[in-house]
Image (cartoon, grey):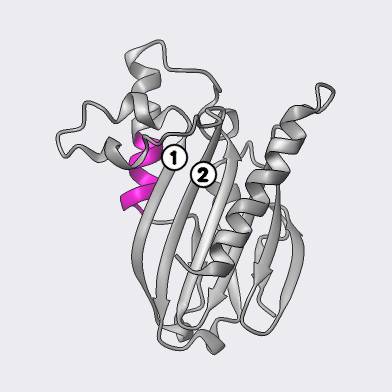
Amino acid sequence: MRPIFLFISSLALASHAHAGSDPHHAHNHGHAELAVISQGQELVLELRADLADLVGAERAPTTPEEAAALRALHGDFRTGEPPFHLSDRANCVPQSATSEGGYAHLIMLDDADGAAGDEQSDEAHDEHMVTARWTWDCAHPDRLQRIDVTMFERFPAVVEIEVVVLTDDAQMGDKLAPKNAILRMP
C-alpha cells in the first residue's frame, strides 16, 4: 500500500473515530465520503457510506432476504461494475476491489470461495458503515479528467458525497449531488 493511501485511510478513520466519541454526534443518512488517490499510474477510489443508504437497514441481517441483499451489495462492490465511470482516455485497468464493514464478515462466511477472510481483522468494524475500495492501473493518468459518479442512480438514498482528491501534483475537495455527479480532476 502506498504511503498517501495509508494517510487518507488513517485520516478518515481518525475523523470517524473522533465523531463517534462525541455522544452528540450522529452519523448522517444520505451522505457518503469518497477519497480519490492518484499516485503514479495507480488510482484508488475509496467509498464510505451508511449501510442504511445502500440496503435500507443498518443492523445485522435477521431474514434470508436481508442477508441476500447484503451479500449482493458486497458481491457487487467486489466483482460488479463500480459506481463510477472513469475517463476512457486514461486507459485504466481494474486491479482490485474490496469491501468491508456492513456485516460482511457475517454474510460472507458461507461463501464457497471463502471470501470472508479479508473482512475479518483484529479490529472491530463500524458495522453500520460500508467501506469499498477499487484500484486501477492507468496507462495515462494525466488524461483522467473526470469521474462520473453513478452512485446516486444506483443508491437513491445517497444525496451527497463529500470528496477528497489527492494526486501527485494537487489536492482538492468537492461535494457531489444527484444533479452534480461529475468529479472534475485537478
Residue 154 appears left or right of 136 = right
Q: Quadrant of residue 143?
A: bottom right
In terms of secondary structure, where does tag 2 sit? strand
Residue at the far top: name it.
62
Residue pointed to by mark 1 = 100
Q: Quadrant of residue 148?
A: bottom right
Q: Which residues are magenta?
A: 72-80
Residue 27 in view of the camera: no
Residue at the far right: name it.
24
Q: Is residue 91 above or below residue 28?
A: below
Q: Quadrant of residue 72?
A: top left
Residue at the far front: name it.
122
Camera-side residue of 53 and 112: 112
Give yes or no for residue 74 being in the magenta stretch.
yes
Camera-side residue of 35 and 174: 35
In terms of secondary structure, where does tag 1 sit? strand
Residue shown at 58% from the left, 28% from the top: 52
Q: CA distance from mark 2 to mark 1?
A: 5 Å
Quarter of the rendering occupied by the N terminus: bottom left
Residue shown at 66% from the left, 77% from the top: 185
Residue shown at 63% from the left, 36% from the top: 157
Q: Are marks 2 and 1 in contact (CB under 8 Å)?
A: yes
Residue shown at 54% from the left, 55% from the top: 46
> In x, y percent, where is residue 11?
67, 53
Q: Amino acid at mark 1?
A: Glu
Few, some or many residues within 10 Å of mark 2 (<14, 14–19, 20+): many
Residue pointed to by mark 2 = 131
